[in-house]
Image (spheres, rainbow, N blue to C red):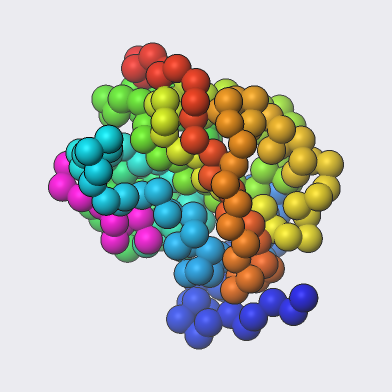
Amino acid sequence: MMAPPLPLTDWPEYFPFLGRFLRSPRTVGALAPSSKWLARAMVVHVGQPSTPANPVRPVRIVELGAGTGAFTREIVERLGSGDRFLVVDVEPGFIECLRRRWPHVECVCASAATLPALLGERQIGPVDHIVSGLPFASLPAETTRQILDAVGKTLRRDGTFTTFQYVHSYGLPRAVAFRREMNALMGSTPSLQFVARNLPPAFALSWTNRRADPARPD
């Protein structure tokens, strides 16, 4: 399947993304920023309408591995009054760019594995939604284990964890193992949305946490 061309509006984000990929492919993990279509699939649970079972209230959202902000932009557009939104990325250049674009958003340059401490420092309780652009397929296994442990310690019961996997790598052993680990951590299996209009095409995967609420971060 041939991937669609990169939209003209995404080219300004492409070059710094490519440069950092070439310098650090294991932490960036992609040649191009995610498309707006993948971004919309990734944030489908953010800004859900009010229902009797789930009334609108301030929510706590974390983005891991924000890159140049393809997902950040979509999340910012859905934020309500009183919502807390924390962006985490290990690349200083990305964080600097994000702070310039959205000075009102809390952005921190740190490892996702330190998420419990980051939330504790900011007095943010268990998180409602975690959106991850991290390249789990290329991260060391121990790093992935530490990040998933951090997710398990911070995501509230019935909260969501959303990430993506490229179509060409979906069936690879590391991708399959990651989904298996997430199934065990969340006590659920993911919803799956195919996004053709991305370079390369990808699946957006979203788990709902069926485990007990984590303790409030210290």
Q: At x 84% / y 41%, what residue is drawn?
A: 173
Residue 186 % position (x, y): 56, 28
Question: Does 21 lie within the magenta span?
Answer: no
**Image quadrant where residue 63 sits:** top left
Q: How many marks?
A: 0
- Classify 53 as above or below 31: above
> In front: 24, or 127?
127
Q: In the rendering, at what x and y percent does residue 165 appear?
A: 67, 53
On screen, residue 122 versus residue 18, left or right, reads left
Asked whether 41 or 28 is in front, the reply is 41
Q: Residue visible at 17% across and 42% down?
A: 82
Q: Quadrant of the C terminus?
A: top left
Q: Is residue 39 above or below residue 118?
A: below
Whether residue 32 is visible here, answered yes or no, is no
Q: Residue 164: where, in percent of width, then height? A: 61, 52
Q: Is residue 212 visible?
A: yes
Query: Where does the N terminus fall, quadrant-wise?
Result: bottom right
Residue 69: image quadrant is bottom left
Q: Position of residue 3 (x, y in %)?
A: 69, 77
Taking the view exactly as shown, the residue that stands out farthest to the left is: 81
Q: Which residues are magenta?
A: 74-83
Between 209 and 85, the one lying in front of the other is 209
Residue 19 higher or lower than 6, as above or below: above
Kindly identify the residue that appears in the image at 46 percent across and 38 percent down.
Answer: 160
From the viewer's perspective, is 119 left or right of 70? left
Residue 137 falls left or right of residue 105: right
The residue under the point 20% across, 50% down is 80
- Specify whether 12 is left or right of 144: left
The vertical placement of 95 against 159, above or below, is: below
Q: Residue furthest right?
A: 173
